[in-house]
Each structure stands twice: as C-alpha cells, then as structure tokens.
Amino acid sequence: MNAFLARLIFMIVSISLCLLMVPVSKAAPAARVKTRIDLSHSVDRKFQTLVLPYAFSTDSLGLNLGIGGMLKGAFQEQMTMGATAFAGEESQGIGGGVWNYQVASTERFYLSAYGFFGYYPDQRAYTGGSLDFTPADTPLPGSNASSNEQYLQADGASNWFDVKLEYVLPIGSAQKNALMSYQLKNGLLVSSPSGGGRWDPLTRGVTILMLRQFNRYQRFEFETNPVDGSIRAAELGVLYDNTDFPVNPTQGSRQYIAYSQDISWLNSDYQWTFVDFEMSQYFSFGESEHASQRILALDFWTGKSPSWALEYDAQGGRKIIDNAPYNEGATLGGFYRLRGYDQNRFSSQSVIYGTAEYRYTLKYNPVEDVNWLRFLHLDWFQLVGFVEAGRVAEHYTAKDLLSNLKVDYGFSLRALTAGIVVRADIAHSDESTNAWVMIDHPF
C-alpha cells in the first residue's frame, strides 16, 4: 500500500473520532440496538481502545490540532467512553461522553450522556426568519426557495449536551437478553443475525423505547447586536430494528417514530413541537468476484412541526413563530441528509427526504499487512454511490413537498475499524460540492 493511502486512512479515522462529538440536527435515530461485538482479530482482548492525534484545516476555522480517544467494553461490554479536544488560532473545543451504560440493578435500561463546548470563528446559520419580518417578495431564510447567501455569520460559541435513557423491550430477538451479541470474521457477520426476514416485532428484531433530553446554546457575536439562543427540549421515540447486523445492515428494515417538544423551561428561548418518522430498507445481492457484500440501502424520512406558524406585518412581511431552531426539527443539509448542501441549509415547518445507496464491500484490504496500522483493527473498505432528494415546505401537502425537490449525488469511502464504521463522503449539488468525514453510516 502506498504512503498516500495510509495517510488518508489515518486522517479519516482521526477526524471521524473527533467528529464523534459533533452534534448533527435530526440525523440517524437517537435510539440504537445495544451490541456486543467479538472481533476475530481481538478474541483475547476484553475491550477496544483507540487514541489518535489529528489535524484539520478549513477556511473558517484555520489550522487546528487535536487529540481524541475511545474506550469500548472496559467496564461493561457494550459501553463506550470517548473524549476529544482541539484548538487553533481562534477556534477551540472540548467534549466527551459515555454511551450505553447499563443502569445498575437493571437488565434493560441504558443511559448515555455526552456533550461538547466550542468556540468557532465565522460560524454560519441559514436562519433569521424568526428574528425580524422578511419582506413579502423575499424568500424566508432557509426555505426551499431561499438563496444560499441568506445566512447569519459571526464568531461565537456553540455548546450542546444530551442525556438519553433507553429501554429494550423483552420481545423479539431481545426476549431473553437486551444485549445483542455478534461474532465477526474479517468484519463480516458469522453468527446468527438479530433480525431480517419477516416483519414481526414479537418474534424478530429489537424494539427500543427512548427518552432524550437535549440542550443547545449558540451565540453570534455581531459587533452591534449579538444574537444568541438556547433550547431545552425532550424527545420521546420508538425504534424497531429488524436488520441482521445494526452496525452494518445487509438485509431487513428499520423504523423510528418520535415526538419532540420544547416548552420554554429552564430559560429556553423557544417553544415548539416536532413529529417525525423514518424507515430504512436493506437488500443483499450477495458476494461477487471482488466484493464480499453488495447492498442496496434505501431510506425515507418525513416530519412536521405542528406549532410552526407565520406572523404578518402591515406590508405583508412574514415572521416565523413557535418554530424549532434552524438546526432542529424539519431541517436538511449536511452530514446525514442532502450532503451536497451546507450543514442545516434548509429548514421550515415540514420536510420530506429520500435516498438510495449502493454499498460495495471490497474483499481486498490494502492495509491488512501494514504493521503500523494494525492498531486501527481495520477489517474492510466499502465503496458507496448515493443519490438524495428532499425539500422543506411551509405546509405538509403533497403539492408542496413533492415539487421542486433538491437533489444531490455523491461517492463515499467507508471502513470498519474496531467494530465502528467511519466514512468520508463527497457530494455534489447545484450549490456546492462538499466533503464530510463522520462516524457511522448515514442510516
């Protein structure tokens, strides 16, 4: 393997570890199947560790240096702890968390708590429709018809903290044990799947109830009139995961429905509600001469904010009230949905989104015999092509949501390292070509 590819792999894993702490608005379901993964190359180890220095540079943040670490399975086999910190000339951030801690004296309750505190130069938000009246002849900022020049931008803080409690129902594959065990060989599932086949929550798959309390604070330090806002909201969700291997599904389906609300408690600046539903389907085409897996993955997501409304002035200008902030609720763009557009590029009352990915897992592993990269426990590489379509609207109607869709397409390189999927996506739209590095499949 050449030195460039080795550096690329190291960079992807390093930045992905850093971005494990980055909040993304509405992304993959907050509820997750609780897993215990036995890796063929670490049968003698009770836990997985990963510590990596990293560096990244962007136009707004400049050069940043950081370090991140992860510890999985040390105290409880399904539990993960992680932390990261970085700093540049003006930007800085620190975060950490604990995921999937089995609550003491219980068998089915799992607690996670994680957060991040950061300061960023030139942070951008495609919002402003709730700050002042937008003239009648001008699209609302962040709307489907808006320009990508309609945004707020300034230095400032962006902090967040989440706590979630999950309960694994004693039905389906989790009837006897809330923790699903998987045996992998070269990153591929060789033990019995936890789902797939017939859709039947009583006999197959895993069903999880989730309660999440999440907090966001963001400040824009404009010279004349600084703008800041905070939310203190809660989400109640139900996940049914009937896939064979939730970390890297090859067959089966997944559904998630949730209700979120902020009632303006504890100094929250917003009062809003949001209901959303997501479903994913996976089809396996088996192996081929060069691929150990060939998977067609489909995802659909839709949602509406019942509280969202418009207020009008005497000149017909509009102002949004009782809405979720631009980075929560009905929002598109960024890491997970419409990757060809900027983060949280679109937001409104209602949303619809669909995507298709073709995932091609290579039999060839170019780092298999590279000694200095073995600490990554990198089992396979996956080539992915994808296309996405979606839009936001002021009304939840087929006429509004199915016309003038935003579309993008792209390519992704993914890898399974220490039982975790990391990905580097490149996506193109009519507004930009974006590169994203992140933990986990987008769905």
Image: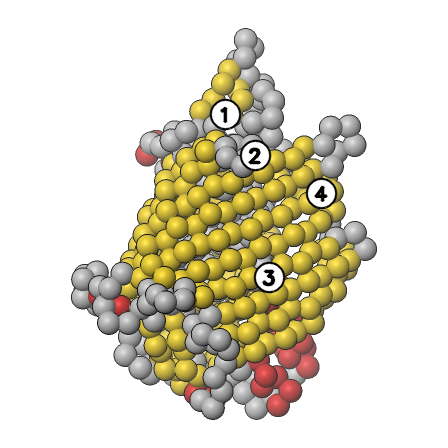
Q: Examine the rendered structure and indicate whether residue 205 appears above or below residue 62.
A: below
Q: Label 2: state its secondary structure.
A: loop
Q: Label 1: state its secondary structure.
A: strand
Label annotation for residue 321: 1
Which image quarter is the N terminus in? bottom right
Residue density around tag 4, few if under 14, some if 14–19, many if 20 or more, within 10 Å = many
Q: Label 3: state its secondary structure.
A: strand
Residue under pointer 2: 267
Q: Examine the rendered structure and indicate whether residue 22 appears above or below residue 183.
A: above
Q: Identity of the amino acid at label 4?
A: Gly
Q: Identity of the amino acid at label 1?
A: Ile
Q: Residue at x 59, y 61 (%)?
A: 96
User: Mark 2 or 3 closer to N-term?
Assistant: 3
Q: Identity of the amino acid at label 2?
A: Asn
Q: Identity of the amino acid at label 3?
A: Gly
Residue under pointer 4: 156
Q: Nearer the viewer, residue 408 or 162?
A: 162
**Residues at discs 4 and 2 in contact (Cβ within 8 Å):** no
Q: Percent x, y for residue 376?
A: 57, 80
Q: CA distance from mark 2 to mark 3?
A: 24 Å
Q: CA distance from mark 4 to mark 3?
A: 20 Å
Residue under pointer 3: 96
